[in-house]
Image (cartoon, rainbow, N blue to C red):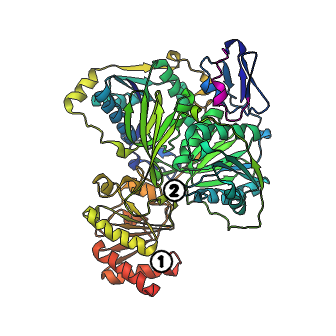
Amino acid sequence: MNIIVCIKQVPDTSEVRIDPETNTIVREGVPSIINPFDENAIEEALLLREQHGGKVTVISMGPPQAEAALRESLAMGADEAILVSDRCFAASDTLATSYVLSTAIRAIGEYDLIFCGKQAFDGDTAQVPPGIAEQLGIPQITFTIGLEVDGRKVRGRRMLESEFEVVEVRMPALVSVVKQINEPRRPGIKAKLAAKKKEVTIWDSACMDIEPCLCGLDGSPTRVVRTFAPTREIKGEKFEGEPAECAAAVIDRLIGQKII
Amino acid sequence: MAIYIDEPKCIGCEACIPACPYAAIDMVDGIAKFNENCTGCGACAYACPTGAIVLEMARKGEVDTSEYSGLWVVGEITPEGKLHGVTTELLGEGRKLAAELDTTVSVVLIGHHIGELAKTAAGYGADRVFVVDHPTLERYRTQPYTNVLTGLINKHKPEIVLIGATPMGRDLASRVAARIKAGLTADCTELTINPETKLLEQTRPAFGGNVMATILCEFTRPQMATVRPKVMAPQPFDQSHEAEIIDIPVDIDERAIATKIIEIIKDDSGSDVNLTEADIIVSGGRGLGGPEHFALIRELAETLGAAVGASRATVDAGWIPATHQVGQTGKTVHPKLYVACGISGAVQHLAGMSSSDCIVAINKDPDAPIFNVAHYGIVGDLFEVVPAMIAAFKERRGD
């Protein structure tokens, strides 16, 4: 089975802040990680390979330093890693990103399954996986919390608002996974060292059949015009002391404001 | 967007015919031809094995934005057959935006046996209701819904399309946007019309809620956005508000649908888990100490008429199913009241609930980060505070 996993290198969001003076995102000194949902995507691909054999290729679109995330996926056990990187991809929105990734996937050739994390931790859009599936013209199973493969059939258990839905599609298909689907393996020192010696293939736009007007700024119908820090001016009231009194005071305030 | 048949490539296999939801393809002398029903939805292009059906995408600057008008809401129907709360919220918000643009609000309802809901949607503010009713559309599936919605958008050219940022909306919106090459902004929490440019300003949180971003779709139409449930306010239901109801005939072949629904599994934890729809949520965290103590959370939730939420730690520990998880790796919620019991307030949890209208936090640790976002904080043992809250509420209510 040929499996492709799409991953993204993201800043560790818990440390990203807005500079209040310039209203721009402060990225300096913020460590980069593999998008946590993508670790589950890699893990699910590796589990399937263990059961059914085949090859796991991990791809990422990003700047040259995203190679570090790909090396980590090699350390986890992926067979091949491709960094899709070109200056003309910069500032791509979700549509342009899914265009570039789907074009790269076509260039890889034959595939049975594509895995993605349900969304990236920085953008939180969840728009790229369906965008890729659409541009490849294949079915998708999004928000997947459990997966079974039987011949060419793929059954995914999707996590919806108040229920789970089991759906079946035929390969080739794209599956986006939620955090709860598995526990990603943590590579040991040996695997990490071995991954350092492996090759990460780098593709620029010339390596693929890319139309420049469909990627980067030109290919992005959306544009961020302003970023700012959220207003979180909460003047909270804090109660300490006798639990019954504190509880009653809060209940009274909630009733008083007609919240309950 | 344009669609055409590259005739020399057509082998007359007829694979496109069952794929078309609008019965828009005829075979003429062994070659596929589009008839006047064609909406350009593109469903056939994916079914064609020889690439004879070509979808031509518009490029930036090639879209005549003046051709597009009206605000659309894509309706969502709950498993119980009711209009989803987010649809009524979007109709309410849509009315405000449409007033700024001096235009109308339409809603698209896709499903089966949904005729009655058209009146409900009208009462919540729709001027026009498109009803697409077919047995194959009874439950949401990516492909037929994408085809139907794309077809309608291509034909009627709305200026703005709003969709709930629910699992359905997020599965569907991106697929449609990718097909018609429209700009789509995810999970918006604020929408405004720029008074000068008349463009839709779409504001959303990013980086786990640490950053807000305002996004425009200047050159493409429709301007599409998914919107977080519970953020916008519905209008009061007005039975006298009437809408034009338009039935859209479709002809969909079940065999041409790639996705089969095998099973629906209800959450069996015995408490309401539709967190995104809930007005009040009571959540438990690691401070509970064990799965059995979720009973206390459930008791407070029942007393207040609330849904039960949970922190990631409790879900990871297997104390409660993942459907209850609030936070960046779980659900993003925006209730009127969020009661956090024994939750320290890790950033990833705050990202999922800090926009709640009112937050009450109960924690033993006075320095727990949850207190930074709480309107009312109680420093104390939740096993004492929560029962006292239940007792106090019941007493005030006169039980």
Instruction: Please indicate whether residue B269 sits to the left or right of residue B255 in the image.
Output: left
Of B34 and B150, nearer the camera is: B34
Provide the residue designation for mark 2.
A230
- Point out residue B267 in the picture as x, y percentages from the top left corner: 41, 56
Q: Earlier in the sequence, mark 1 or mark 2?
A: 2
Query: At label 1, which amino acid type do we have?
Result: Leu
What residue is drawn where x is 40% and y is 49%? B329
- Point out residue B65 in the picture as x, y percentages from the top left corner: 76, 38
Provide the residue designation for mark 1.
A254
Q: CA distance from mark 1 to mark 2?
A: 25 Å
Of A131 and A239, nearer the camera is: A131
Residue at disc 2, secondary structure:
loop
When the figure is inspected, residue B243 is found, relative to residue A1, above or below; the finding is below
Can residue B13 be found in the magenta stretch? yes
Task: Look at the magenta stretch and give its main secondary structure.
Answer: loop
Residue A223 seen: no
When the figure is inspected, residue A256 is found, relative to residue B156, above or below; the finding is below
- Point out residue A9 in the picture as x, y percentages from the top left corner: 41, 35
Q: Residue furthest top?
A: B8
- Point out residue B79 in the picture as x, y percentages from the top left corner: 54, 54
Query: At label 2, which amino acid type do we have?
Result: Pro
Q: Nearer the viewer, mark 1 or mark 2?
A: 1
Can residue A142 be found in the magenta stretch? no
